[in-house]
Image (spheres, rainbow, N blue to C red):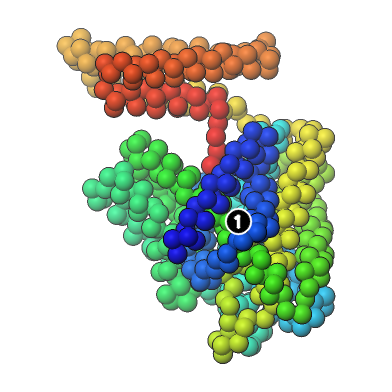
Amino acid sequence: MHDNLLLILALLFSVFMMVMAAQKMKIAYPIFLVLAGLVISLLPGIPDVELDPDLVFLIFLPPLLYEAAWYTSWNDFWRWKCPISLLAFGLVFATSLIVAYVSQALIPGFTLALGFLLGGIVSPPDAVAATTVLKGLPVPKRILSILEGESLVNDASSLIVFRFALAAILTGTFSIHQAVGQFFLVAGMGIVVGLIDATFMYLIHRFLPTTSAIDAALTLMTPYLLYLGAEQFHFSGVMAVVTGGLFISYRSHEIFKNGSTRLNMLGVWTTVIFVMNAMVFVLIGLSLPSIINGLEESSLIQGIKYGVIISIIIILIRFLWVYPTTFIPRWLFKSVRKEQSPGWKVPLVIGWTGMRGVVSLATALSIPFVLDNGSPFPHRNLILLITFVVIFITLVIQGLTLPFLVKKLKIPALDYVLPQEQQEAQIKIRLNRLAINHINTNYYEMIERSNLLKNYYSQILTETENTENQLDIFECNTCTSQEMQRFESILKEIYEKQRLAIFQMRREKYYDDEEIRKAELQLDLNDLKINPNFH
């Protein structure tokens, strides 16, 4: 056990090194994760490390889904609900259905239930992979919003397909009509349980005297409580996690009012999700040798061939689905026509962003080793191999070519969005003016009597004036992009020198460490404004 733990830690460290190399090369880190899994499987003397499949599903999937729900913009989600729904439900079911029948005809001994199991695994694209690749590229915000919303819901719908197919294989009975009826019942009640449990957690955060550490710990517990609460009644734990995550995220401003709490939670969740992503690919790398050795009647070459064929099929299905569902609703509904037409370029990019990732891999690893009667689960190793091939092809080929495609297309801006710096400045001015008006209305006579209030009032007036000047810079029509880049470059130089000064202050031991850390935090927040780092 100690040797295996040391091995996993060493492999994780190696994966982290690869991710840092990916950042240096400006390549999306999920691409390096799948390559890391492949390299790990080829290392000589790697032991076979296997976890309980139920444990894999329980440990990895609830927090991954919850994190996706937490960072989903509800306004954007609701605005683009039509394309999101068509992709997240319609495309997932269409992909699962076609993959089921194709794999049944293609793979000897593959049943329709096994086909739906495989379809449920490979049908959901990974938004983290797509948005990581697209970050920094000139793409309309509409594309990112649709991809993030699609990934949130399609994870839920595909996992429900997976669980139904798995139950059918374990029990030996499968009926599409019965499965469709059960789907709506299980999914609907999962939503209800998710809302009930999320309300309970909301009340704890809101009315009990929690601390920053307790709030962060409770948010880590919440996805597991949501999932287990729904599964206890045989409803969809996946829908409960997604629904609960959206609910608590929407109410977060009411329950997490302390800035340190939010920053602490951000650090905790960013670390946990990154490690989980890396851990899943380490596990598949450790499992690949035994998977290949246990391919039964299917050889390695045949398994790779099946994976390539299914990869091509799901890529084609996405294109065949995206274009009609983009334009047919515009022809049918006047409300959809009010939005600016995406043209042919946006569907092309959305069609090429169907990269599979960590959710598909974690789902495949959760397939049990044996059936209820004790016999080996049919074609388990082959399904895992096909899943890895699909992830490898979609991530590496589509992921590496997507930036080139976006740059070549030169997609025009569809929906005007204020630059991030300009939005921040306008929000800051509104909040400062609210504070100024509140003091003028209620405490104006105290300004001269209270030095504390007088200093704060002067500070906020000065800050508002400075922010308005900053906003004038952003709204300057004569300022070129080169000027803005030069301005940001100067700020980076200043921040770097300030970091060195803070380091020198720490060595002087004149100031308290707590005050030094506060200065570092403020500097980090300033740096974040010109170096946005999304989750």
The reply to whether residue 449 is in sight is yes
User: Which x, y percent locates residue 281?
Assistant: 60, 56
Against 372, residue 39 (above or below) is above
Percent position (x, y) of residue 87?
A: 69, 57
Where 172 falls versus 139 (above or below)?
A: below
Q: Residue at x 45, y 12 (%)?
A: 466
Residue drawn at (66%, 46%) of the image: 32
> Which image quarter: residue 317?
bottom right
Locate residue 176, reporting x and y percent. Answer: 68, 80
Q: Is residue 330 visible to the viewer in this orientation of the structure?
A: no
Q: Residue at x 73, y 61 (%)?
A: 389
According to the image, label 1 marks what residue?
Answer: 281
> In the image, is 227 to the left or to the right of 450?
right
Residue at the spot 29% in from the left edge and 27% down from the top edge: 514
| Relative horizontal placement of residue 84, taking residue 297 as reference (left or right) | left
- Quadrant in the picture for the N terminus: bottom left
